[in-house]
Amino acid sequence: MTPRFPFDNSYARLPDRFYTRQPPVPVTAPRLVAVNRALAGRLGIELPQDEAEIASIFAGNALPMGAEPLAQVYAGHQFGGWSPRLGDGRAILLGEVVAPDGARFDIQLKGAGQTPYSRMGDGRAWLGPVLREYIVSEAMAAMRIPTTRALAAVTTGEIVQRDGLLPGAVFTRVAASHIRVGTFQYFAARKDTEALQALCDHAIARHYPQAKGPAGLLDAVIGAQARLIAQWMGVGFIHGVMNTDNMAISGETIDYGPCAFMDAYHPDTVFSSIDQFGRYAFANQPRIAVWNLAQLATALLALIPDRDEGIEVFTTAVNGFADRFDAEWQSVLARKLGLGENREGDASLAFDLLNMMAENGADFTRTFRALSGPDPALARDEFIDPTVMDAWQVRWRARMAQEDIGPEMRVARMRAINPARIPRNHRIEQVIAQAAEGDYAPFHGLMAALADPFAEAPELVAYEAAPEDGEHVTQTFCGT
């Protein structure tokens, strides 16, 4: 059959200085690793049954009808340092599809070859980061956290040079859009007010049609980021590289590079090998979001006729992030503890638990999941000193008694937000190592285990285990 992609490429209708039109660079011998047919159906994409045909499409060798491939340009602050011109150095946007429900999504190939924005890079990706992004983005979607999605992964039959010779691959990413804070920064830095206004109008129409002008857009993005980061932290997720070019205007999680989920809880946890000073540590993520949003506000300021008034309005908006995030974070923590309504003392109950977890090496996911079970006392087993939980559990049970729900409802409520299984770092590394040797069974097994992370599944208990001695992964890498 002829594949069908319901393309309608609005970004390609923006002025030429927003991108460079360029097709993907073909690869030698594409081979399908995985395709997300359920997602394809959601997008209204009709794919052939033949795996070789699918691999050819998602490697970039065979462009589907209606594609208008291009590489987007943007700028960004990377670890606080300004880079005036970044852009898609290894990614090609095939175009946008309009799903049957009217929602619009980008289809992008990562690892699709060099572009004018590649700088010194080869424009390719190796298999490890492709599988990492596939696993983590789909796990995030299963946990109902806004995220880009994985549509396909293919190997290329080519070798890429990284720390040695590694198998090449291409990842197909689906996003509400790829408009970033850095996209606005790019045009603001060039004092291109016309392009900045066009981008603002495009972003509002695409993501926040209720927003009115630059101030409305900024307010909407602030709210979306406050919700997103609270949800990240609710599952122990650390993005690892929250540069302004990695913050999507849509409020989706984007750019899964050196990301990771915590095992033992500690607010200062860092995994990224390039984050030497903890800029993007777990507890720093809300503060970095404020910094990034301030850069967005600065970029949008050029669209405000009265600069002094704009500075006052935007400063108030950005400073308001802290209260909005705190409300979202406390709501997440309350729900993780089974509390349906916020009451005085709930915040201290939650933060006292987190402090005890940090002091006692308690596993983040396993502690909250144990509290979600019929016998919450089992959560004591996650602590070096289990007795520290006793007084806290007396307080928690007393607070739960005020909820006026039975044990079964409490369990159901808590299990709906506290996952049993996350994509643990050691599991991902094992999957990558075996896939590099040609064995994809562990990858597919992990994907199956993460498809419904909240469900009780005794047969999947091995995927719930914390890493044992010698299995801990303490560093993750960008690596693509």
Image: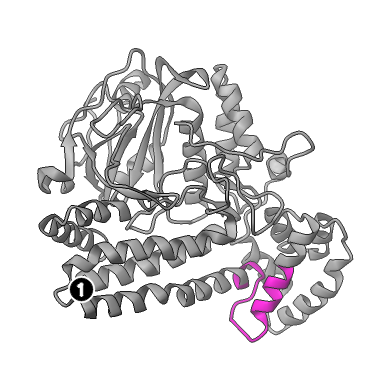
- The residue type indicated by label 1 comes to Lys
Residue sitting at x 31%, y 34%: 89
List the single residue furthest toward the front.
Answer: 81
Q: Is residue 160 left or right of residue 260?
A: left
Q: Quadrant of residue 155?
A: top left
Q: Quadrant of residue 359?
A: bottom right
Question: Residue 78: x and y, percent?
Answer: 41, 48
Residue sitting at x 26%, y 68%: 217
Q: In the rendered image, which quarter contains the C terminus?
A: top left
55 shown above or below 19: above
Question: Residue 319: x and y, percent?
Answer: 41, 75
Q: Is residue 291 left or right of residue 305?
A: right
Q: Is residue 233 left or right of residue 251?
A: right
Question: Residue 468: x and y, percent?
Answer: 78, 38
Query: Would residue 103 be seen by someone viewing this image from the given angle?
Result: no
Q: Is 237 colored magenta in this rendering?
A: no
Nearest the camera: 479 or 106? 479
Q: In the rendered image, which quarter contains the N terminus?
A: top left
238 shown above or below 112: below
Query: Would residue 400 be seen by someone viewing this image from the given angle?
Result: yes
Nearest the camera: 10 or 43? 10
Question: Residue 65: x and y, percent?
Answer: 16, 31
Q: Secondary structure at mark 1?
A: loop
Residue sitting at x 33%, y 57%: 250
Residue identifier under label 1: 212
Range of residues picked out in magenta: 334-353
Residue sitting at x 40%, y 14%: 157
